[in-house]
Image (spheres, rainbow, N blue to C red):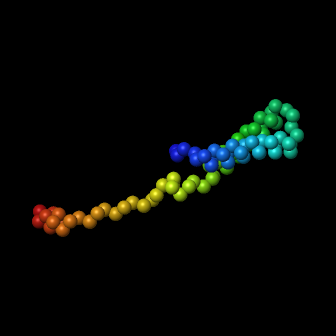
Amino acid sequence: MPRPTAAQLAYGSATVVFATVAMLLLSGTTTAVGVALIGVAALALGLLVAVTLPVPAARRRSTYTPARPPVPAERREHSLRR
């Protein structure tokens, strides 16, 4: 598995922080279970954001496979004589 880029780490972390603050403010929960559920939901959302962030073109794997170099004429003739 490739290592995450700096952008993936930054966007994922920012998403966790802002999602946690927003959900805590909007829900108004005061129980430990509610805060824990919001924290888990924010972590899941941050992970989703970090994983779906596009990977730079330089880190993508190429499906290109180079063709074999042509066989010299001497080798072709030699292999046909056998």
Residue plotted at (71% across, 45% down)? 14
Total tally of numbered discs in the picture = 0
Residue 73 falls in image quadrant: bottom left
Residue plotted at (11% across, 65% down)? 81
> In which quadrant is the C terminus drawn?
bottom left
Residue plotted at (54% across, 44% down)? 3
Tell me residue 13's x, y (percent): 69, 43
Q: Is residue 48 above or below residue 38?
A: below
Q: Is residue 26 left or right of residue 46?
A: right
Tell me residue 77's x, y (percent): 15, 67
Q: Is residue 58 left or right of residue 37?
A: left
Tell me residue 42's x, y (percent): 74, 42
Q: Is residue 82 above or below residue 55?
A: below
Taking the image as drawn, is residue 41 in sight? no
Taking the image as drawn, is residue 3 in sight? yes
Q: Is residue 65 left or right of residue 50?
A: left
Residue 19 falls in image quadrant: top right
Tell me residue 45's x, y (percent): 71, 46
Residue plotted at (53% across, 57% down)? 57
| Residue farthest along the left direction in this orientation | 81
Q: Is residue 80 left or right of residue 41?
A: left
